[in-house]
Image: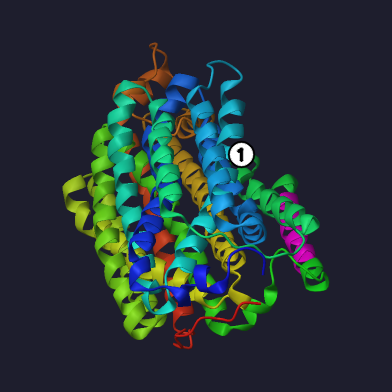
Amino acid sequence: MAGTSTSSSGPTGASTSEAPRQRLALAAMLFAVSMTFIDQTIVSIAAPSITQELGLSASGMQWVVNAYLLSLAAFFALGGRLSDLFGHRRIMLIGTLLFVVSSVLCGCVPEGGLAQTWLIVFRATQGLGAALMFPAALAVVIAVFPVERRGRALALFFGLSGALTAIGPLLGGWLTTWTWRAIFWVNVPVAVVAIVLTVLARIPESRRPERLDVVGAVLVAVGMGLSVLGFQQASAWGWSSVATWACIVGGLAILLLFLGYERRTSQPLIDFDVFRDRAFTIDNLVLFFAMLAFVPVFFFASVYAQVSLSASPNQAALFLLYFFIGFGIASQWGGKILDKRGARPAMKIGCALGAVGFYLWAQKMTDLSMHDQWPYVALSGAGIGFLLAPASTDAVNRSIGASYGEVTGITQTVRNYAAAVGMAVFGTVLTHVSTDRISSTLQDRGLPADEADSAARQVAEAVTGHPDGQGPSGDGPVAKALQSAGDAIRMDFAEANQWVFYGMAIALAVAFVCSLAHPGTRVTEQPPES
């Protein structure tokens, strides 16, 4: 293998004298990836303000969130492979620079007709930067720490990044009161710290002298893009639309074509032989179903708090903070369980807690009381915290020939594709159920069915139906009906969110069933370098 020797870069060569370098490397990678986590939550807090100022549609705002997630999912496998081929440190730094430049451009979006396209494009390039950065950063941590200490190190990695993510909603709430544009600009100082710490850590570089599978990269990106486009646009096109199913079925067909191509090529983008390991397959199934809820929960909980609970952005941020408190505490326990007993017990506990937490949280949503919900919000976060690091670490520990970038790319592709699908499907559910319930409310107040349906679609499309802040003007019958139905519409929106959060509970329940099939074996030795 080109680059540094195994003794200098491999985890088996770690010693007490290397501990300071390990800590610096962990801190550097933590700051780098924290930007990707912060941007998933901070944008959700600012969504209503962005929508109002730029005049975005609900589907447009969801694409601002989803473009980032979709780009992550589409390019993570490529990022992991590039990390193996050209060096984890180098690709991490390139990804960080692309991410922070895109962040600045997102904050500089002009008002007017170009705004939505501008924001979606540069959110997508942010996602590309994150797709390059994250697998490389995680591969650095894995390469620096020996396998017997890796569970604790990655528990710190995911737990502390989760804790830093908790700063996202708080910071987003505070910055949004000044300008929502600052939520993107805040990435600049974080990136500077990450780059400085990376240089100070003197992380050894390693490369794999192989070719890049360009055809595979194109196929996986197009397949994922088309399928998520179909899920996302189902709310606008309808589930009976030919276009909806053409995108979904076409995207899945291209992904199957990608699978066939990868099995035939000599140096594939993804080596699917790793899925012969039953534990690796189960790890990824658990991550897929858990991630259907994990990233979308930030967007839907934030909008629910600001619409149904009439919360300010700062209050919505505090609402999400309960989730991260549970997440941060449980992630440390999950790492300890992984080191002592393997991934299976931690995944089972996490999936069960998550399913119960999301179910109880959904039940309490129609109480319209933030105080009554916080224990279940924290329980939901604890469930995700328990399972995330063990499932991810166990999967990566089973890498073929120590190809950490490639295997990290697989797991992160699964995670982010699931998050994009979750955003799309749950967004469709929320839009349809909100429209139906608001239409029924308006018809009860005397509006004809056609007018009620049209007004309900407009309210649902606006995402935030906050009647105090965005009530309709004029004195026509539709405006009067909407103005008088403010409290009822808040309840309608809460009931629609119940469907979403019940769906998240079901996803965690399916993840629990998958975790039962994990063989319970543990990785205790370093896989050989190829």
Q: x and y percent of residue 193 in the render?
A: 38, 41
The residue sitting at 33% across, 34% down in the picture is 172
Q: x and y percent of residue 357 in the render?
A: 30, 63
The residue sitting at 42% across, 38% down in the picture is 192
Depth check: give the residue in front, 521 or 424.
521
Can residue 146 be spotted in the picture? yes
Q: Is residue 253 magenta?
A: yes
Q: Is residue 320 left or right of residue 223?
A: left
Depth check: give the residue in front, 172 or 92.
92
Q: Which residue is mark 1?
A: 236
Question: How was this image coloured?
Answer: rainbow
Badge 1: how crowded within 10 Å, few (<14), some, or many (20+)?
Answer: some
Q: Is residue 324 above or below residue 393?
A: above
Can residue 40 be spotted in the picture? no
Q: What is the quadrant of the C terminus in the image?
A: bottom right
Q: Amino acid at mark 1?
A: Ala
- Numbered range of the magenta stretch: 245-259
Q: x and y percent of residue 67 in the render?
A: 58, 41
